[in-house]
Amino acid sequence: MTENLMLKHQLMTLTRKQTRTPRLTTFDRFLFGYLVFFISKVRLQKIAVSLKSATILKFHQALVKRKYRDLYSRKTRISPGRKGPEHDLIELVVEMKRRNPRFGYGRIAMQIYKEFGIDVS
């Protein structure tokens, strides 16, 4: 039964509309890998799709590259560019605008400078 399922899936994979060798999806790889556990080695050699050694080496190189990229990269992603204003400052500006709807940008900035004792001149 497992052999039939594997053969059917191989046929579906090989008959996809392509001019070259079929591109295996992630599902194809997982399914073939899972079904291999249930088939004897002798039968597997008869029904398995052959792979070139270069394909296996490229797959291994990709795994190694991914391993070291994950090992030595930052664990937290940082976004490039300037950091925005702090949350407290945003809350202060919104509160001032709510209390004084006629205040514009310049007046709010002057009030903040006065509050924190920053000399603008």
Image (spheres, rainbow, N blue to C red):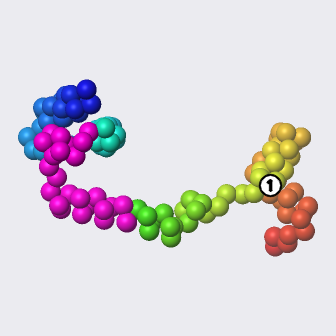
Q: In the picture shown, does residue 43 fall above or below 87? A: above
Across and down, in percent, residue 31 comes to 32, 37
**Quadrant of the rendered image containing residue 63:** bottom left
Which SS class for mark 1? helix
Is residue 49 something that shows in the picture?
A: no
Residue at 85% in and 72% down: 119
Prevalent SS, magenta region:
helix
**Quadrant of the rendered image containing residue 5:** top left
Residue numbers of the magenta segment: 39-65
Direction from residue 44 to residue 28 in the image, left or right: right
Is residue 51 something that shows in the picture?
A: yes
Across and down, in percent, residue 65 comes to 37, 66
Q: In the picture shown, does residue 54 fall above or below 9? A: below
Across and down, in percent, residue 93 comes to 81, 49
**Quadrant of the rendered image containing residue 69:** bottom left
Please give the residue where the numbered disc 1 appears in the rendered image: 89
Is 60 inside the magenta-drawn segment?
yes
